[in-house]
Image (cartoon, rainbow, N blue to C red):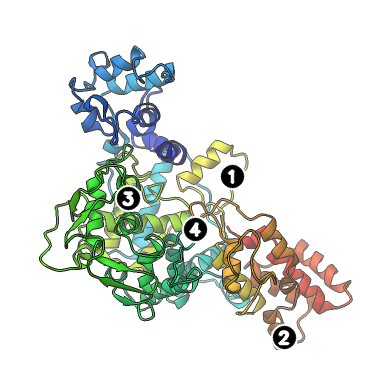
Amino acid sequence: MGVVRSVVGAGVLAVGLLATATSPVAAAEESLLERDVLPILTKNCLGCHGGLKKEGGLDLRTMPAMLKGGESGPAIEKGHADRSELWKQIASDNMPAGDDREKLSAADKAKIKHWINAGMPTVSERQKDVETVLPAAKRHEPRQVAEAIDLHISRFLDQAGLKPVGLSDDAAFLRRVTLDLSGRVPTAEEAATFLDSKDPDRRAKLIDALLDRPDFGKQFGRTWRDWVCPPELPSNGNAGTQPYGQARAFGDWIGKKLTEGKSWAQITREILTVKGEIGKNPQVIFYALVGQGGGTSADGTSRAVASLFMGVQLQCARCHDDPYRDWSQREHWGLAAFFGRAQGDFTKIETGKGASKKPGEIAIPGSAFKNSGQTIKAAFLRGPEYEAKGTDDLRPPFAKWLTAKDNAFFARSLVNRTWFYLFSRGIVNPIDDFRELNPPSHPGLIRMLSNEFVAADFDVKHLFRCLCNSQAYQRTTRFAPGADDRDRSALTTAFGRMPMRLMTADVLFDSLKRAYGDEKLDLRTGIKDSTVGMAAPVGDAWLEFQRRFGINEEDATDFTHGVAQMLTMINHPRLQARSKALEAFLKKNPDAGVDRVVEWLYLSTLSRRPVPEEVSEAREFVETATDANTAYDGVLWMLVNRSEFLLIR
């Protein structure tokens, strides 16, 4: 059912819009493979005619396999349902087979029949000729790329009959881009300076300034740390408790490399080819995090590398050919063989015997569902086998192949993840499920951005600069009055409106530190041995906050905060106490009146000035209080507990 959710639940709206947007007129009865037919086959047919099981030799996963057919010949004849064996079996209710199997509905049958008679049309074939707007093999100015992004999206919206929302105001943009690029709210002084600026290029200049700060690398690094780390970190006898400190150091290492000017290709190669001890090489932990029980495993590395750096899901192919995706078990283990000589844990990585019999080969383990014991040679994904030449470590040649400019997997994977980070959904969704039967919603756009990323030598800052300068990124989160639920969903899916997102734990914690002027902010509960809902020991203030305020990484629009988070924010004495930042402001400005102090508090938390009604309410609260300073603390407490503070709008 996983593939049904990814195709039908997460992607059907975008694919449906794409079908309309890429054809002049879509007939009411039109059927397309990815949108209409594949979900029916996945639910009812692939269990018997997929990668794991092919009754009668019939594989219904792909178009070529359908046309080839099985032991009785081709399953489909294009344009002729009445001459197609698949349709005959479906029409007569012989498929799905079995007395206990639910037969297809009349509507589902009609979709399949229309599809065959129409010549088996697909969304993918309509995407082949979509122009990229900008030529490949040339690095462009960020503003050119941003304009091309907006052209791609505006064409899509126009053809789908959707009207985008307007741009966000300066305050919303300032807060959004600062949170996204530096991982914390701007200071009151930064907010006031930007909001008072009359420079027509102030937004572009702000983006440049934020990308030049080390905070950008830090935020990028910890985002990748979260993508790599499993929900609960493994441990082993040597590591003791879960190595959260090492995981944090890994994110910091990525951030420092980016700040030093390293490209994403260079950083990736240093991760995948690392040797030695973790004290000198924080990226050592990558292999333990994606392995098993705190140690390296070739198949765990294979799955993680495919997902994180190539954008494909190989997990099902560990044990058998994937019945829902066109990945074979041999492809999974051919990739794993490159990592079969690496061994280690949280402390070090070495190369030696590992899981491989000899360099360039690996045996499928007994835990696999099929073909255990079979020896597989190292092979590049969708490429040739690699001939090992007496070396124990095949990771360097793999990393070289992976990060080559002509590798179709590498650039588009990072582009898609970056888009997901900023827009809460990928151009391909799920973000690690690139395949022909899960096409991108905006094919020309992702092709153009991938080309640009390659031409820029995998410059991450250039990619962010291009995306953040686009109108698509700078749109408001507000809908036009009267928009119905379907229009709202369609507009957000088509990138005609920015979704509201929940701050990650890191971003919220650093934003609270800034608002309170306290880099050592500690919001632990005081319980020494456990935390709310968790049995693991409380390591430090950061870890406690991570455990309580972690969000759904697959959907930042999903508001996951509940009672535990609310009670912490409302009741923790530290958030009710004095702000060191406010204390410093009052010391510097002893004659500041109530209105000015309130304005400063709004700027330092919500990155905007209060409206007159908010000023009036705050003034009344402060002036009627016994102690003004205590009242100011109360205003700050109120502001950080507003949804406006917790959300990226």
Q: Is residue 201 above or below residue 1?
A: below
Q: Which residue is mark 4?
A: 231
Q: Of tags 3 and 1, which is closer to the observer?
A: 3
Q: Which residue is mark 3?
A: 312
Can you tell which mark lies on residue 334? none
Q: Find disc 1 in the rendering and name its residue.
A: 480
Q: Residue at x 75, y 82 (%)?
A: 592
Disc 1 vs disc 4: Cβ atoms closer than 8 Å? Answer: no
Give the position of the C terminus as an image quadrant.
bottom right
Q: Earlier in the sequence, mark 3 or mark 1?
A: 3
- Place residue 46 in its image quadrant: top left
Where's residue 620, x and y in %?
85, 68
Residue 21 placement: quadrant: top left
Drawn side of residue 121 relative to residue 228, left or right: left
Q: Position of residue 407 (x, y in %)?
A: 22, 57
First in sequence: mark 2 vs mark 3:
3
Vertical side of 86 occupied by 130: above or below = below
Secondary structure, mark 4, is: loop
Q: Nearer the viewer, residue 181 or 354?
A: 354
Q: How many marks?
A: 4
Kindly state the secondary structure of the residue where label 3 is placed.
loop
Asked if one can make out residue 455 in the rendered structure from this viewpoint, the answer is yes
Q: Earlier in the sequence, mark 2 or mark 4?
A: 4
Measure the C-alpha gap from mark 2 to mark 1: 42 Å
Asked if the residues shown at circle 3 and circle 1 are in contact, with their CB atoms under 8 angstroms apart, the answer is no
Please tell me which residue lies in front, 561 or 534. 534
Q: Disc 2 vs disc 4: Cβ atoms closer than 8 Å?
A: no
- The three-letter amino acid code for the residue at tag 2 is Asn
Give the left or right position of residue 413, taking residue 341 as reference.
right
Question: What residue type is disc 4 on?
Answer: Pro
| Residue that mark 2 sits on | 589
The residue at the point 25 percent across, 46 percent down is 372
